[in-house]
Image (spheres, rainbow, N blue to C red):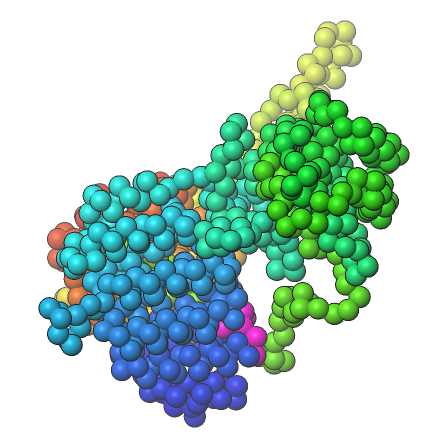
Amino acid sequence: MPTTASDYQHPLMVAYWQRLDTRFAQVAAVFEDCMAEALAVLTREGIDAYLDAARVIGKLGRGVEPMLIFLEEWPSAASAVGETALPSVMVVVMRLQKSPNGRAIAPFLQTLTPVAKRLQSQEQLQHYLDIALDLKARTTGSIHGHHTTFPSPGLPEFFAQAPALLNQLTLAGLKNWVEYGIRNYGAHPERQKDYFSLQSADARAVLQRERHGTLLVDVERKLDLYLRGLWRDGERLVPYSTAFDELRKPVPYYDRLGMRLPDVYDDAGEISGLDRYRAALAHMAGHRRWSEAQVADNWSPFQRMAVEFFEDCRIETLLMREYPGLARIFLALHPKPVEGACDPQTTSCLRHRLAMLSRALLDPDHGYADVDLNDYVARFQAIMGKGESSTREIATLALSYVAKTRCPTDQLARVHFADTVVDYRDDNRQLWKFIEAGDEEEAFDEKRKFEPGEEHRGLPPRHYPEWDYASQTYRPDWVSLYERLHPAGNAADIDRLLAKHAPLAKRLKKMLDLLKPQDKVRIRYQEEGSELDLDVAIRSLIDFKSGATPDPRINMSHTTSGRDIAVMLLLDLSESLNDKAAGSEQTILELSREAVSLLAWAIEKLGDPFAVAGFHSNTRHDVRYLHIKGYGEHFSDEVKARLAAMEAGWSTRMGAAMRHAAHYLKARPADKKLLLVLTDGRPSDVDAQDERLLIEDARQAVRELDRDGIFPYCISLDPNADDYVGDIFGRQFAVIDHIARLPERLPQLFLALTR
């Protein structure tokens, strides 16, 4: 295990390790894997900031846990909200460190990735961080007025529950939920802890009260398909919150980072929140397809406003031509200003006039009597009747309208806003370009650049949840799993094992012959088929020559009559396999290797697609998943060489390994999917003090497999397995008391399960 820079082979990895400046062995074990993921998503500057932040966290005096969590979680979080959010994250870490709330750093970092994936933008993440810091400041207090302070009881619980809360609430709702907890339980530490861990009835009641509307994250997939299918646009959707801008509420817009939409839409009368999202996306997609940016330097703000209203109506007219059903949604969401509601003697009525005109351009039954308005509606319709028109042509019409209808009072500071806001329309920032360079150009990130030659072995880690039976919730992204191709040994060793068990193989072959499917079954007497049935054809010809009516069913076809099953054999490779088997001179690992070799030989003879993998773990930060045989491989010398090199070590975090095996098994096109787990002990790991924790997590993983149509079955070599294996697998297990018979029993069990 590398612990110094000289232990690494790649010169870049040496430099990165030196920059990290740590001696934690647990970090060294996963450092290359973490860097592989980081290098795939971060820029060069982002990598430097990543390592600097990890070094700082490692020297906080909080042990290895916060540093490990940060190294594993930040690349995924950065890919969701952008690497420039890191300084804001480190501000929170340092404020927690300098307060009595240092123990909240680990849960804060642990849930950072699921929170970031839910929020999807740096702006949203900053609002979340502000809520957390406000909670810290207002619930960290003194004891009876003395200088001694106590940490916020609810802060670690809040961080742990944040992903679940954001699955149900907008940031505005989360802010209100937190505010209620602070206001009512700020002086009651124990009740505060119950509230922020969602244990109290009050917490759940307030949560239900704050839930409303359609959350963008819940319908993002539907909207993405809608955007791609109807508008042939695959732009990324990025949410923003409307809860933190009191003076000027943000509106939808798009830029180089994606299409920006509110994080929640409430229903608007008969129009659902989902349809409001569809209207906003259709409008932006129309601009992206048909609008052309205009030079704005020589136009007044009033002229630009008129051009925007006219261009919005042109775009929506074209959208409704393509999909007439949009008219119902647009008209239901578009305000209908009352004619005469604005007094031109005391108020600027330009917005009111433009909103009326916008309604009239879309609604044939608008009912407005204004002569100028109706004149320009007719001129607009005449232009649109010729085809798509252009932004420039519509802009000319808009400037003419402003010149014709301007009033001296349009300059007044008092503006009529009632019924003039069309909230599904974007802010039209892309409709304008300026000859002089402005700050707008700084809003777009450059394309990410990667260092040449930054190639590292292995795949980035996969993060899996883990079930917490005490709270009956998942700990999101709790386990980091690293997968590798198993190292190779000597394939001849496996050939010798198969020769050793030749008599057993001979008996198995008789069983295999009974199970082996007939690949082709002939179906005769078909009018249409893949080939001629010669016997029937000759008989029909004889009938024809003799004057009888011939049988037209002279063809035959074939169908496959076989087993449709996919198998995954998952091997526990924990340290206990190095123990001697009871009643044998061989270790459990050696007997397992023989049994797996025979089983692989048997499944290969049957022709079933199967894969073999092993796993072991060294805390939740380092679960290793080793590929021994893939579905696309035959039981060849390469696979035998990997089997020959099997080694045992570390612990047994079974739930994560089963979830990852299911990831591959779910992708197989088979009627029956079988996951065989071969283990010699209960699920355990060095960082799990509660022995029930990983048993319950494995039990939950089995439920997930059942839900996904995968049949899990455990073959246990532990004579005491009856105490726990039934809790995990129900009745789907077998205990082999005489481990020495494993090479014989394992293939027989498989054949019995798939008979």
Give the main secondary structure, helix, strand or loop, of the magenta stretch.
helix
Image quadrant occupied by the C terminus: top left
Residue at 45% x, 74% y: name it: 87
Q: Determine the image quadrant of residue 131.
A: bottom left
- The answer to whether 23 is drawn above or below residue 94 in the figure is below
Residue at 30% x, 72% y: name it: 96
Rendering coords of residue 230 (x, y %): 67, 39
Residue at 65% x, 60% y: name it: 256
- The answer to whether 101 is drawn above or below residue 513 in the figure is below
Whether residue 471 is visible to the viewer of this picture, yes or no, is no
Image quadrant occupied by the N terminus: bottom left
- The answer to whether 719 is drawn above or below residue 726 in the figure is below
Q: Nearer the viewer, residue 534 or 726?
A: 726
Left/right placement of residue 166 relative to residue 266 reads left
Q: Nearer the viewer, residue 564 or 154?
A: 154
Rendering coords of residue 11 (x, y %): 52, 89
Rendering coords of residue 373 (x, y %): 78, 32
Left/right placement of residue 308 relative to residue 115 reads right
Residue closest to the far right: 386
Left/right placement of residue 110 relative to residue 302 reads left
Q: Nearer the viewer, residue 741 or 95?
A: 95
Whether residue 120 is visible to the viewer of this picture, yes or no, is yes
Residue closest to the far bottom: 6
Residue at 52% x, 27% y: name it: 270
Rendering coords of residue 146 (x, y %): 12, 74
Q: Which residues are magenta?
A: 37-44
